[in-house]
Image (cartoon, helix red, strand yellow):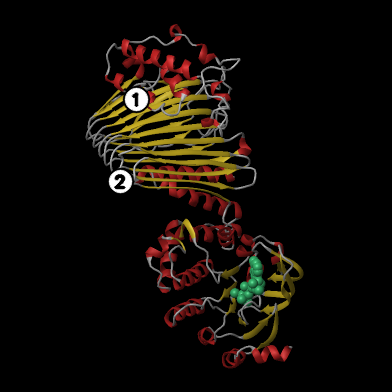
Amino acid sequence: MPALSRKTAPAQLDLREADLPKGGKWITEARKNALGRLHAQGLPTRRDEYWKFTRPDALNAPEVTPAALLVTDEKPVFCDVDRLRLVFVDGVLDLDKSDPLVMDHIEIEPLKDAAARDIHWAKDLFGVLEQNGQNPVARPFATLNTATAEQGVVIRVTGKVTRPVSLHYMRTSETADAVVHNVIRVETGGDLTLLENGPAAARLNKVLEVDVANGAAFHHIRTQGRDHERRAVAHIFARLGHESRFKSFTLTVNGALTRNECVIEMLGDDAHATISGACVGDGASGAFHQDDTVFITHEGLNCESRQVFKKVLRNGATGVFQGKILVKQGAQKTDGYQISQGLLLDEDSQFLAKPELEIYADDVACSHGSTVGAIDEAALFYLTSRGIPRPQAVDMLVLAFLAEALEEIEGAEIREDIHQRLEAWVERRRG
Amino acid sequence: MLKIDNLQVKLEDEDKQILKGFSLEVPEGEVHAIMGPNGSGKSTMSYVLSGKNGYEVTGGTATLDDMDLLDMEPEERAAAGLFLAFQYPVEIPGVGNMTFLRTAVNSQRKARGEDELSAADFLKLVRAKAKSLKIDADMLKRPVNVGFSGGEKKRNEILQMAMLEPKMCILDETDSGLDVDAMKLVAEGVNALRDGKRSFLVITHYQRLLDHIKPDVVHIMADGKIIKSGGPDLALEVEHNGYADLLAEVA
Ligand SMILES: Nc1ncnc2c1ncn2[C@@H]1O[C@H](COP(=O)(O)OP(=O)(O)O)[C@@H](O)[C@H]1O
Ligand SMILES: [Mg+2]
């Protein structure tokens, strides 16, 4: 990636060390390190190969583009799930609105508190997994996040946590420009389900670093803000130990711009990772551009990774998938699977996919497929011939198309919750 | 009930005429059968009546109880009481058979201004009807027609018909590919729906089905139109002599 070569550098690049948030020793070092890397990287431009399908302009503009708030009377996602809830308002953790941070086998601490200390266990992860994930492709928004984030939580899991931890992002401001950085360590024998939902900000830069130790499990289910004008760039950096399990599912409905990057390093042997997403975009209610960019590196033996992405696009909506499986030398018996599918409901919409495999081991089974298609007219006729109105029949086929991605969600209750949401949103849209 | 007059249909994308002056009338409560060689346009006729895309009506009319079918959307035709049991039922991965049935039943009720069936009432109804067609719970749960055998697909068509209680039922080769027992089940399903008011148009190649579902009138179709109509004996004649003599008669 070229260093700064632009005439007008965004304000973020004018950052000096003095501008960084104040904190304890460990985080100050991490932030300084990130700032140095950011200056070397520069922010993405439209000329960057990695941003070929998605324009980063609005994300790295000095000023946030205001985004109207979504007015709705519907209950938030996951509200019926028994969970420990942490509430962020415009990107700021609000402990008064949150549940007490107490549960068995887990320590939850606001990043602000952890940052104030001179020594903290998060030192080994904060900005570390992020930095590991910058090679061979630079991810400057994540670097920027590490340098400037003051909000987030750090979580340590020492056993099986019975209730999910839920990060609920509320938004009250049309101009909220939020940077959130969450760090999670799931120790051996630990098992955590993390839920994330809500509109968060007009512009959100979010990083999640997860270390899943040997024999640990981490499940992640998120629904991104359904407000139409919001923009978000989110990164997940995960490191997986021996016999660990990692599953992450994302539902994206609406949003002017969403870039979800997921970087997974399968370090230990016999680990499993699934990253999946369902996306429903309608350009009629504003711009819609959604991008899933995934990079999975297999280092351990006998690991399995799955990527399952489904996008339904209409009225000029754009869906992007860039997915790479890198199998390093020695990562024998790797089982890598990747599927990305676009369902275009009209000719104005587009699905752009770049699936990649790079394999340096000889005993591996990797498969990838990408398809783009229109609605099945024969199925549509069958449904309408039974009296189901065409718009409803289309929605049934849309939900059927997405079902394969939803099946990747761990846990029947949450899967059903997501399914019902999706059904309700689809129905509401139909009017 | 169903009145088709001089219907002319061509393919939308091709200059190919398929129905060439097709006329037929099925009065209330009657069962009519249509027989005819492959490619004579029987399925096309049933598709055009139900509103499938890809065909262009270049002349003629088709009405159901004086409603102009050709002017309606497929779902409106269904709500008006028209039902087609497909020759090749469509597989729909990801859509549960039960969800599909309930949505269809309630869509039609809604369109007619009736109350929707409650989940419990629906379940009771569907279980009873499925049982008589030997459709087990598993088939109801599975995605629509996915992984169903040929016979299961056809029985599933009859189940839909039984649930939707249409006025006018068109069965397109529902007996093809069925063994004797399965065919009996299907025929019983159809006969159970005969109530003196409901009408049927049964497209078949075989006399066998007509032994079980006794037709009032048998029509022979060839090259896009009806070439001969008669009583049940006409089906026996076809069974014994094939279509050659009949075709020669009109030629
Ligand atoms: N969509 C289509 N595209 C091309 N040819 C078609 C299409 N539909 C029907 N046909 C042709 O129209 C004729 C009648 O077909 P069909 O209605 O299926 O006959 P039948 O059901 O009597 O066997 C056949 O020659 C068939 O190939
Ligand atoms: Mg046919």
Quadrant hosting residue B86: bottom right
Crowdedness near tag 1: few (<14), some (14–19) or many (≥20) residues, C-alpha within 10 Å: many
Mark 2 vs mark 1, CA separation in Å: 30 Å
Q: Nearer the viewer, residue B70 or B235?
A: B235
User: Left or right of A339: which side holds B237?
Assistant: right
- Please tell me in which quarter of the rendered image ligand 2 is found: bottom right
- Count up the numbered dots: 2
Residue at the far top: name it.
A18
Residue matched to label 2: A333
Residue B236 visible: yes
Pinpoint residue B81: horizontal percent, then vertical percent: 61, 67
Q: Is residue A232 above or below residue A35?
A: below
Q: Amino acid at mark 2?
A: Lys
User: Left or right of A276: which side holds A373?
Assistant: right
Of labels 2 and 1, earlier in sequence is 1
Quadrant hosting residue B44: bottom right
Residue matched to label 1: A183
Pinpoint residue A415: horizontal percent, then vertical percent: 39, 44
Crowdedness near tag 2: few (<14), some (14–19) or many (≥20) residues, C-alpha within 10 Å: some
Pinpoint residue A276: horizontal percent, then vertical percent: 42, 41
User: Left or right of A385: which side holds A307?
Assistant: left
| Mark 2 or mark 1, whichever is nearer to me | 2
Q: Is residue B212 above or below residue A413?
A: below
Q: Chain of mark 1?
A: A
Q: Amino acid at mark 1?
A: Val
Pinpoint residue A323: horizontal percent, then vertical percent: 46, 39
Q: Is residue A394 above or below residue A60?
A: below
Q: Nearer the viewer, residue A267 or A190?
A: A267
Q: Is mark 1 within 8 Å of ligand 1?
A: no
Q: Nearer the viewer, residue B1 or A57?
A: A57
Residue B49 visible: no
